Amino acid sequence: MAVRIALAGNPNSGKTTMFNRLTGGSQRVGNWPGVTVERKEGRLRGEEDAVIVDLPGIYSLSPYSPEEVVSRDFLLKDRPDAVINIVDASNLERNLYLTTQIVEAGIPTVIALNKMDAVAKEGTRIDLGKLSKAIGCPVVETAALKGDGVDDLARAALAAVGTEAGNALRYSKELEGHVSAVEGVIRGVVPAEAERWHALKLLERDERLRGDVGEGVWGRVEAVVSAMEARKGDDADSIVAEERYSLIGRIVGESVDRSGSTRRGETVSDRIDRVVTGRWLGVPVFAAVMFAIYFIAIETVGSWGTDALNGYIGGTVMPAAEGWLTDAGVAEWLVGLIVNGIIGGVGAVVGFLPQMAVLFLILVLLEECGYMSRVAFVMDHLFRRFGLSGKSLISVLVGMGCGVPGILSTRAIQGEAERRITAMTVTFMPCSAKLPAVALIAGALFGRSALVAISVYFIGILCILMSGVIMKKWGSLAAPPSHFIMELPPYHVPQAVSVARSTLERAWAFVRNAGTFVLLACVAVWFLSSYDWGLNSVGAADSMLAGIGNSLSWVFVPLGFGDDWEFTMATLTGLLAKENLVGTLGVLFDPGGAGGEGLWGAVGGALTPAGGYAFLLFNMICAPCVAAVAAMRHELGSWKGAAKAVAYQCSLAYAVALVAYQAVTLLSGGGLGWGIVPAAAALAVLAYLLAARDPFGPFRRSARDG
Ligand code: GDP
Ligand code: MG
């Protein structure tokens, strides 16, 4: 069997960068915690049978979060042949906390002292010999970002395989006494090489070991633990944690020389953070950044590209294709299918690529430089008031690219209630597939204003927060928001290669969707809208699709977009992939294929601004695409759970769009129609759900343990 080497370390210590260096792989790197939830494997470069396993980033080996459980189970149950512990040298004290526990696990360990480039630049000197001696295992200097020390590290890790694990860490006499006492109790019950680890974990009163060691042993250990607590007047895990920190303090004091360090007081990062994460400016800065993103991507730079591309598709590609196909003697219906159905529909979506590409680029830059972590930090307070935390916000931010990874990333959230709520509401924030629809409505009805996009994001967040309150109150999901420890990594200039790769990856996913789901839907829409039930070629108004649409669109009349069946069909095809919102309208409204402007004109003529805005809101909040529903099923554990979520999403979408439509109509002098009655009712129900005292409170089960 191949030699297995695990990579373990704190979030953001550079594990993934190192993994890519060691394996030649291209896993995603982010200046962003929680990117690696599952472990990944890759073959060590230049070695036939050595496998590197990238574990999720963790701060300790306590079983408090899914990441910690994954890493802990792997180290203790699967027992790799060696561990590379990636330590962020610029944050030595905090990183060594995990190191103490890894070393205790009794697996041969090599420490990679990473980010040494940053440390050296700052003028701090670390004595590797002393550090290695104090901990009891080899230490290698690395800078994964530049590739320095990577070969040495690989060699050291291979050399460690098969050797005896070293551990020179010794705590205070008193604690060591307790360790020996517990070791005596558990001898023979746990594997000899992990005896010290178990002893210390049991002294922390780690409940998860209770089953492993059995009630009898647990009871005898408990006597030692209680005695220790009584003597110290503190709880067990704080006592052990304090011991670990004071030992780390001693080791760092001996081996690190900061006398030449330029890091006195504030760094540049600190100074930026004082503004960006400040109490008063944090949220306004975030709002300004959001505005800037959409101003650049949707309103200006991106839209120049989109206009040019649309003009090219509509003005050059479509007429040329039509002429060429007709000259070649292709049947008229097939020309219609290819030109109007496929090129028209897919083209309407692909035409937005420039805007998407600019948007992706900006989002990737913000992620990599470290700003996105600040957003989660800034919003943590706000989210906490609604029973969620900054961790939920990370999922939401991931979901802005695509809802599927957004939903899957909720696995990193500790609290079961918070995790489920987040999985059900992540898609309220528009993903990139929904943005063409935002751009279309903004362009067709609101003079391209970036405010349309901003307001949709704002309402998305509002819906998430409202849902947090409603679900906790009325669902069986009561539990306080989880702890949220998050470090703010120093800002740094993103790496061109990795930015380019992430941007292209996302742009490619957009194009790939256009070439599959959208293509499929466009062909179906074209077919259904070109023929009647007797398969006679007819105008769209008499087609099968119009028949289906007309039988359903009454549902959307109160929302102001039900008078034209095309919008109902766009909404339906949007369930397959949200790009279809625009693709379907492209086929139905723009058979001539004038691209952007033509489609905008047609949509602008069919809807009032209020109706267009309601169309947008409904489609942003209602059931996400099938891929995202499948992801929800995965995370919620059953189809029933996913079905409930979809029902909730659709009801909320309907209520919000209804209220918005009626309010905008009223405000713009449209007068009172009968629709005001259901709108007022919807508003009243929402208000009741939000404000009423919880009538089931006393009977509700706590979902804390899931
Ligand atoms: P992970 O969370 O542990 O997987 O860490 P990543 O590999 O995603 O890296 C986190 C951040 O640290 C990224 O912004 C990297 O570019 C940066 N980083 C990684 N290795 C180094 C290094 O050796 N030197 C410096 N200065 N930065 C690094
Ligand atoms: Mg990672």
Image: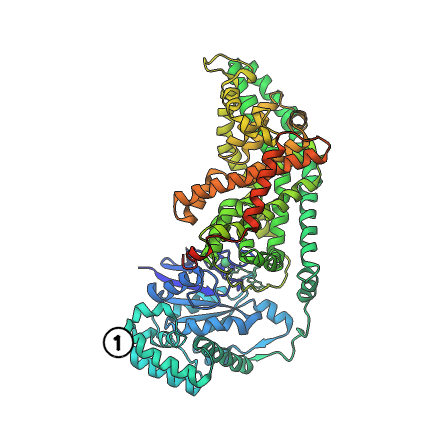
Residue 699 x/y as whole percent: 42, 55
Camera sees residue 31: no
Nearest to the observer: residue 627 or residue 107:
627
Left or right of 496? Residue 472 is left
Q: Quick check: 387 above or below 161?
A: above
Identified at 38% across, 86% down, the residue is: 177
Q: Amino acid at mark 1?
A: Gly
Total marks placed: 1
Hey, which quadrant is residue 336 in on the image?
A: top right
User: Is the CB atom of the residue marked by disc 1 within 8 angstroms of ligand 1's nearest atom?
Assistant: no
Q: SS at mark 1? A: loop
Q: Quadrant of the C terminus?
A: bottom left
Hey, which quadrant is residue 583 in on the image?
A: top right
Q: Quadrant of the N terminus?
A: bottom left
Q: Dot 1: within a 10 Å radius of its alpha carbon, few (fewer than 14), some, or many (20 or more) residues?
A: few
Nearest to the observer: residue 659 or residue 72:
659
Q: Circle 1 is placed at which residue position? A: 188
Nearest to the observer: residue 143 or residue 183:
183
Left or right of 557? Residue 423 is left
Nearest to the observer: residue 483 or residue 648:
648
Residue 389 x/y as whole percent: 55, 58
Residue 273 x/y as whole percent: 67, 63
Camera sees residue 206: yes
Q: Quick check: 571 above or below 250?
A: above
Residue 137 x/y as whole percent: 43, 75
